[in-house]
Image (spheres, rainbow, N blue to C red):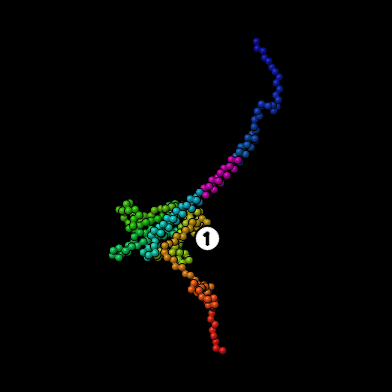
């Protein structure tokens, strides 16, 4: 025998312990708000990442430029001198809008027959990369001559193998070399070493000028002026002024006051009345 017990249970609305489901509108609103927060966070992260990469790229390009300019300065200091056996050639031109330059340092000597021969030659040159034009210019350095840089590795090589061009760096957007002639700078030089050489390079993003050539902002350029033969004797010219002519010499300080005061005064011209 089964006895069924039925109780009248009243359902109380919003009673504690009872879960209420979310409506479709509430779910869509929550997803929308979450998406907006996520987009904002990703935007901040991307901006921070771009700023960090820009700073790192600028530091790396500045460091690389300083290292290249230091190497050029070492080549000039080692080869050039005040004698006439050293020759420097500087050429500047535009290649596909990019400013390029070529620096040639040649040191000559004379053999036993008094015949001139090339002792060593170093060439710094920026070349436009036709295979990958997006990276800009490639900077090369070549070395040749009878004064081998490596006596062991370069011993049995011919002249073509010795005159090899080694790529130093890529991505150069500006490479300019000028020689100091007095107080002015010239873009072409083919003579003994000048008093100084100015080298400017940059890896920054270029912009196009009105004439179609490419250039970078001045604050993005790295420039170094290299003095040639810094041990040379410098002649100083001292200009004399009127005040220095009236200064008494040590021998004149021992004179009586009247005679010392009369020094430097113009003599009166006596005229016959």
**For the residue labelled by badge 1, is the local secondary structure a helix, a strand or a loop?**
loop
Left of 34 or right of it: where is 89?
A: left
- Within-10-Å neighbours for mark 1: few <14, some 14–19, many 20+: few
- Counting from the top left corner in percent of width and height, residue 68 is at 44, 54
> Residue at coordinates 52% horizontally, 58% vertically from top-left?
218
Instruction: Indicate the quadrant where residue 138 lies.
Output: bottom left
Q: Is residue 111 above or below residue 154?
A: below
Q: Where is mark 1, residue-wise?
A: 210
Residue 249: percent from left, percent from top: 49, 73
Say which of 90 and 222 sits in front: 222
- Vertical order, 242 against 152 (above or below): below
Question: Is residue 54 one of those drawn in magenta?
Answer: yes
Residue 268 visible in the picture: yes
Name the residue located 48 percent from the left edge and 50 percent from the top edge: 60
Write down the quadrant of residue 129 in the picture: bottom left
Question: Can you see residue 176?
Answer: no
**In the picture, which quadrant includes the N terminus?**
top right
Say which residue appears at 47% left-offset and 56% top-offset: 201
Tell me the chief SS of the magenta region: helix
Q: Which residues are magenta?
A: 37-55
The one of 219 and 149 positioned closer to us in this rendering: 149
Residue placed furthest toward the top: 1
> In the orientation shown, which residue stands out farthest toward the bottom?
273
- Residue 90, how many percent across, how many down? 42, 62
Based on the picture, tell me whether residue 61 belongs to the magenta stretch: no
Q: Return the x and y of residue 4 as percentages of the image width and height.
A: 67, 14
Quarter of the rendering occupied by the C terminus: bottom right
Q: Residue at x 66, y 29 (%)?
A: 20
In this view, 80 is above or below 49: below
Above or below residue 25? Residue 240 is below
């Amino acid at each position: 025998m089964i006895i069924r017990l039925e109780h009248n249970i009243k359902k109380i609305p919003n009673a504690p312990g009872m879960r209420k489901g979310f409506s479709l509108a509430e779910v869509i609103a929550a997803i929308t708000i979450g998406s907006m927060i996520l987009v904002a966070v990703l935007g901040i992260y991307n901006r921070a990442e771009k700023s960090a990469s820009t700073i790192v790229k600028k530091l790396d390009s500045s460091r690389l430029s300083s290292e290249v300019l230091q190497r050029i300065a070492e080549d000039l200091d080692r080869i050039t001198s005040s004698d006439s056996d050293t020759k420097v050639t500087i050429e500047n031109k535009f290649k596909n809008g990019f400013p390029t330059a070529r620096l040639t340092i040649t040191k000559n000597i004379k053999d036993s027959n008094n015949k001139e021969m090339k002792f060593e030659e170093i060439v710094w040159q920026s070349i436009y990369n036709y295979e990958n034009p997006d990276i800009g210019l490639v900077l090369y350095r070549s070395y040749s001559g009878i004064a081998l840089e490596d006596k062991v590795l370069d011993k049995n090589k011919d002249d073509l193998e010795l005159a090899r061009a080694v790529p130093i760096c890529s991505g150069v957007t500006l490479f300019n070399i000028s020689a100091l002639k007095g107080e002015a700078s010239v873009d072409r030089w083919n003579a003994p070493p000048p008093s100084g050489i100015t080298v400017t390079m940059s890896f920054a993003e270029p912009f196009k000028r009105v004439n179609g050539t490419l250039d970078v902002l001045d604050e993005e350029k790295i420039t170094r002026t290299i003095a040639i033969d810094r041990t040379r004797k410098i002649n100083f010219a001292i200009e004399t002024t009127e005040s220095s002519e009236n200064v008494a010499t040590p021998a004149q300080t021992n004179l009586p006051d009247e005679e010392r005061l009369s020094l430097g005064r113009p003599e009166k011209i006596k005229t016959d009345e």
